[in-house]
Amino acid sequence: MNSNTAEGKFILYPRASLYFALGVLITWIGFSQSYFSQLGKATIWHHLHGASAGAWMVVLISQPWFYKTGRMATHKLIGKIAVFTLVPVLVVGGWLMMHSMMVNVDLYPPDVPYTLSFIDAFSIIMFIFFIYMSLAHSKFIHRHARYMSLTILVLMPPALTRLLFLTPWFHDFPSSLNMSFAIVELVLLLLILDDKRSGKIHLPYVLGIFLFALLHITMNFAAHWDWWRNIMDQYGAFPIGS
């Protein structure tokens, strides 16, 4: 997955833009029925979160290309703009979507809002953490690129869960949700194996698979934790985002 250009410049993941574009395709298909076909029914917070997440994916597609073609000034400028504009909007939109869900808890099957809110909260924290780690290691390409790659994987489970509903093998929410995380963990395992084949296993993907596995396990119990339900009930009582 790594290569060197004719000029001898090391390029990590030369086809990264294509992989990120695949993430956009998965998202588009996954949300085709639950969101894109019902735009008029979605709240402003869904639109805000969806637009910022989509824009972030577009940034991830473009950044490897700018790096690969030597346009580092553009790479850095777009990165800074995205971090200081898209990331806050995406994060705030995610929290407001959680609030909207808790306000309308009766519209969901029992316990589902508490499960989804736990996943959302954990994922938002992971997203911020990966962004921070990527920026903190911006001068070290092996760590910077890997931490940034992890950000798109944070966005994948919701799309994968919905995509699996479109297949003939998954018809219920728990199995689709758990399989979506299993797919992300498989991708991370393959990335770790690719690192090993290249000569060194780097920390980002190891940390990433640990955090995703931790979320995967705990999300199946969160709806039954009284402390989490109390937190979300109190959060939903605040007169915001609805």
Image (spheres, grey):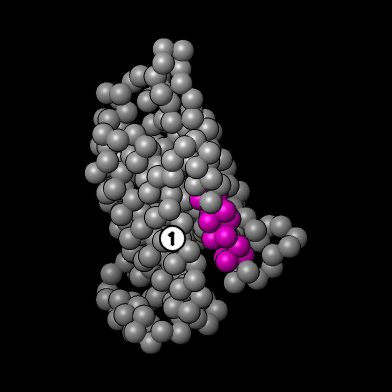
Identified at 38% across, 49% down, the residue is 203
Q: Is residue 178 above or below residue 66?
A: below
Q: Residue at x 27, y 49 (%)?
A: 132
Circle 1 residues within 10 Å: few <14, some 14–19, many ≥20 = some
Q: Position of residue 35 (x, y in %)?
A: 54, 56
- Judging depth in this view, the residue of 229 and 3 nearest the camera is 3
Identity, as a three-letter code, of the amino acid under mark 1: Phe
Place of residue 105 in the rendered image (x, y in percent of width and height, measured from the top left)? 45, 78
Q: Which quadrant of the view contains residue 54?
A: top left
Q: Residue at x 33, y 60 (%)?
A: 125
Q: Count up the numbered dots.
A: 1
Answer with left or right where residue 107 lies relative to residue 63. Answer: right
The part of the chain drawn in magenta is: 176-188
Q: Between 28 and 179, which is closer to the camera in this rendering?
A: 179
Q: Secondary structure at mark 1?
A: helix
Residue 46's quadrant in the figure?
Answer: bottom left
Q: Which residue is mark 1?
A: 210
161 on left or right of 115:
right
